[in-house]
Amino acid sequence: MATQSEAQLEQSLVARLSARGWEHVAFKDEAALAANLKVQLEAHNKLTLTDGEFARVLNHLDKGSVFDRAKTLRDRFHLIREDGSSAFIEFMNTRQWCQNRYQVANQISQEGTYSNRYDVTLFVNGLPLVQIELKRRGLELKEAFNQVNRYHRHSYASGRGFFQYVQIFVISNGVNTRYYANNRKQSFKQTFNWSKEDNEPLNQLGDFADIFLDKCHISKMIAKYTVLHEGDRQLMVLRPYQFYAVEALVDRVRNSVNGGYVWHTTGSGKTLTSFKASQILTEMADVEKVVFVVDRADLDYQTTREFNAYSEGSVDGTHNPNTLVRQFSDEHTPLIVTTIQKLNAAISKAQFLERMEPLRARRFVFIFDECHRSQFGETHRRITGFFRNFQMFGFTGTPILEINANKSEAIARTTKDLFGECLHQYVITDAIRDENVLRFSVEYWGKLKRRDGSLIDEKVAGIDTREFFENPDRIEGVVDWIIVNHDRKTHNRDFTAMLAVGSVDALTQYYDLFRAKREAGLHDLRVVTVFTFVANEDDRDANGLIAEPEFDISTEAPLHPHSRDKLQTYIADYNSMFGTSFSTRDGQSFYNYYKDIGKRIKERERENFNDRDRVDILLVVAMYLTGFDAKKVNTLYVDKNLRHHGLIQAYSRTNRVLNEVKSQGNIVSFRNLKKATDEAIALFADKNASETILIEPYEEQVKKFNEAIRALFDVAPTVASVDRLPDEVARLSFVRAFRELARIKNVLSAFTQFSWNDLDIDLQTFDDFKSKYLDIHDQNRRNDGQESASIINDIDFELELIRQDKINAAYILQLLKDVNSASGSQPDRQQRLADILDMVRSEPSLRSKRELIEKFIKHNMWHSGEGDDVHIAFRRYWEDEREKALSALCVSEGIGRAHLNHLLELYNFTGQTPQREDVVGALTVKPRILERRKIVDRIIDKMMSVIRVFDIDTGDI
C-alpha cells in the first residue's frame, strides 16, 4: 500500500471536519477573506453593515501584534453607525463558546515577502483562529513546525494581517499530531499531544480531529483555556492534563461540597493549571472568593510575576495580614493570592478575629499549591476549624502517601486524608513520554581525593555520620571535583547548577572553600548562597522531607549568631558581585535577597539577559529545592541525604524542558543515594519506571554514538564525499545522520568520563563533517522562501547542539594575538592562521563573521609587533565595518541615522525586534499601506543581520 501523500492527508482531514459540521469554503485571495468576514460577522451579530461601517471594523481589527489581536478577538468593538446609532460588534462568543459560526478552508494563498499556501485553516465567525500544517507520513513533524515559523516570517502579517488572529496551530504527519499557541518565541519542545482523560495520547490525526477539532471543544480551548500572559505578551494554551484537572475541579465545586487534590508531576505547569482553575471559579455566582495559598518561600519573584501576568494586581506581596483581611472583606476582590503565614495570622490572631468573624459562613474555595509541604497540617486544622462553608483543593507533584507520611506525628496523615480524592493524576512517566519534562542522568561519586592524594571512600561499611560527610578533606575533594567538571555539566556555564548540602555548617565550609579557591585564581565560578540561621535548616534525614525556610528573622538574640555573621559576609559578596544592597538586618531585606537570587536565575531564560548577571552555582541546604521552576537550571550536585518526595522534588529542579541542548537533568550525587532514588521512582511512578525516568549510562550512550557513526558513513564515507552527494535526497540523509550524531554527542559530553578515545571518530573528523553540515545549512538559508522550495527547507539543523560557547569573536582575536606575538617561521604562522579559519568555518556562531575575519587576516593582520597591537587594530576594523554596514542600511532604505540608532537602542533594551510602527516612523518617505509590511520586514531583516554579525557572539573585543 502506497504512503498517503500530503494532499490526500489534507483532503481526508477537510472531509472529516466537513462531516462534523464545519462548512467547507474556498478563498482565492484576501479580498474574498474580507468579504466572507463581513458576511460572518453580520450573521453572528444579527445586523447588516454598510461598506463604510465594515471598513471601520477592518481598521479596528488591523492593529497591533498577535497578542494585541488576541485581546481584540475577546473584546467587542463599539461601532458608531452611519445613522448615529451604536452597535457592539462581537468577534467571538467566549461565554457560550459553541454559539459561533464555523468554516474550514484549504490551500489559501497569501502574498507576503514570498507567496505561501496554507494547508488547512479553521475560521470562527470569519476570522482564521486555527491553522493546521501537514506533512506526509514518514516525514518529521518538526518540519511542519518549521514551516509555520517560515510562514510567520514571510506572509502571516501581510495584507490586513488576518492570520495574526490565529490562536492555535496544529501540526501533523498523520501518525503524530501536536498543537500549540500562536507564540513565535517557543520552540518545538513547547508543542503538545492531546490525550484522553487517562493520559493516553491521541496521536493519529483522525482521532485528534474528532475530539480536539470538534467545534465546541476547539472553541472552548480558545475561549477558556488559552491564557494571555501579560508579562511576556504571549499566548499560552493549556495541555490536556491541565484541561482535565481544571474541568474536574470546577465540576467538584459545582456539584459537590467535597474537596480533592490534583497530582501533576513536578515541572508540568501546576501554577498555570491552578491559576486557570481559580479564574474560572471566580466566575461562578455562588462562590464568593477563591483563595490561592502558597508558602511564603514560594511567593517569590516567579509566582508573583506569573499570577500578576495572568491577572494583574492579583498578588499582594506585602507581609502585613491587614491587607489579606481587607481583601476577604472586599466584594471587588474575587481572587486572593496569599501565603500560609498570613492566612494563619488572619484566623488566629486576636486583632484580626473581629473583622474575620462575620466571614466564617461565606462560601470560599481554597486552593493550596505544593500541598505536600511538611508544615501544612497545623494550619490545615486551623482553617477547617475556622471556616464553615468552604471547599479545599490541593496541587502537588509528590503527594504524601502512606509510605512517605511523616511518622513523627501522632497520626501520619496523607494528602488524601487532608483534601479528599485525587481528581486527576499525571505522573512523571506520563510527562516524560509526552516530552513535557526531561529524564535524569544520575552519577554517583563516592570516591574523592584528599589533599595528599589518598582516596576518601564513603562506601566503607557503616559510615553514615555527619562527622564523616562534613570532614574538611572530603568537602574540599567535592569542591575540586566541581571546579574541574562544572563546565562540562552546564555546557560551558550556559546553565546554572545547584549544590544541596546537609547542614549550615557544611554549607559554610563549601562556600568558604569556593571563595578561597577563587581568590587564589583556581576558578572564576560565580557561587551564591542563601540559608536561614535557625534550627530548622539542617536536613531531616529521618523522613526525607525538605524543611521550610524561615523568613521572619528576629533582630535580637539570633539562635545561631555565627551562621548569621557568615551569611552577612556571603550577602556582602553577592552585593559586590551584582551591585545590590541586601543584608540580614531584618526579615524583609533577607527575603528580598532570597527573591533576587530566584529572579536572577529565572531570568536567564529571557532573550535580553545579560551574562554578567548570571549565577553559576546556587549553594543551599533546603531553600529552592522544592517549587522553584527555572529552565536554565540543568544540574544538581547533591551532598545530603534525600528520600521519597524530598528526593524527587530536589531532582526535579533540573528537568524543565528548554531546547535541544538541555537533553536531560544532570544529577551528581556525592552520597550513595542509589537505593533512595530507586525507591522514590517506584513510589511516584512505578517499580519498573527507572528505565523511563533515567537516561542510559555512559557505556550505552557510547554504543549509540558509534552506531550513529556507522549510519553516517553509510551516507558519506568520508568528509570529501559530502560534496559529491548526488541530489537533495542524499544531502537530506546526511543532514539527518549528522544531526543524530550531534544529539548523542550532546548527551555524551555531559558525562564526566567522556573521552573521544571511546568513539569511532576523532574530534577533527567530527568537526570536518560539522563544517559540511553547516555549508548545507547556509546554502539552504540563502534559498529560504524561493518558489522552488528545497526538500531541506524545513529541516531543523539544531545548530545549538554544535555550538561551542567559548568560541566567539573575542576568542578568535586572542588566537590572532597569540599568532602575531609568537616566534616561528612564516609558513608556521600561515598554518596557524589557516587552522583559525577552519575553526571559524566550523563554528555556527562565527560563520556570519567569517568573511569579516578573513578580510582582516588578509589585509589588516600585522605579521610583526606586539599582540596588543592586533587587538587595537581589530577593534578599530570591527567598528569601521559596523559603521559601513549601518550607513549602507540607512542609504538603501531611506532611514535617518538617528532613527536607526533609536531602533538599535530599543532592541538592546527589550531584546525584541522593533515594532512595525517604530520602523515606519524611522523612514524618511512613508510607504503606501499595501507595501508597508513588505518593506518593514525587509528593514528588520537587514537590521537583525547587522546585529547578528557585529553584536552577537563577539565577547569582549
Image: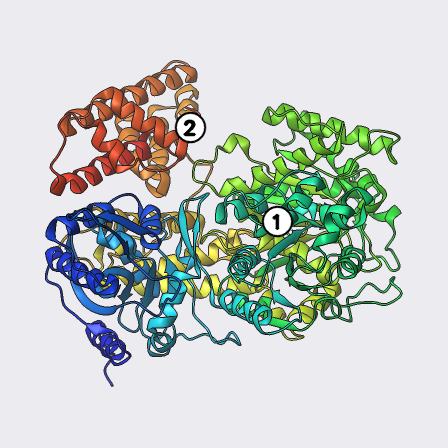
Q: How many marks?
A: 2
Query: Circles 1 and 2: CB distance less than 8 Å?
Result: no
Is the residue marked by circle 1 packed among few (<14), some (14-19), or many (20+) residues within 10 Å? many
Q: Is residue 584 visible?
A: yes
Q: Secondary structure at mark 1?
A: strand
Quarter where residue 585 is shown:
top right
Residue 571, percent across and down?
A: 70, 29
Q: Is residue 453 visible?
A: no
For residue 810, the mark is 2
Residue 850, percent across and down?
A: 29, 34
Residue at the image point whose x is 32% and y is 40% from the top: 841
- Check disc 2 and give the amino acid type: Ala
Position of residue 828 relative to residue 210, above or below, is above
Q: Secondary structure at mark 2?
A: helix
Quarter where residue 888 is shown:
top left
Residue position for label 1: 337
Position of residue 180 relative to residue 325, above or below, is below
Horizontal side of residue 138 vs 237, given as left or right: left
- The residue nearer to you, when weighing 106 against 737, is 106
- The residue nearer to you, when weighing 377 against 726, is 377
Quarter where residue 487 is shown:
top right
State the CA–CA distance, disc 1 to disc 2.
48 Å
- Check disc 1 and give the amino acid type: Val
Quarter of the image with the N terminus is: bottom left
Residue at the image point whose x is 33% and y is 24% from the top: 826
Horizontal side of residue 110 vs 372, given as left or right: left
- The residue nearer to you, when weighing 559 against 694, is 559
For residue 520, the mark is none
Position of residue 947 relative to residue 391, above or below, is above
Quarter of the image with the C terminus is: top left
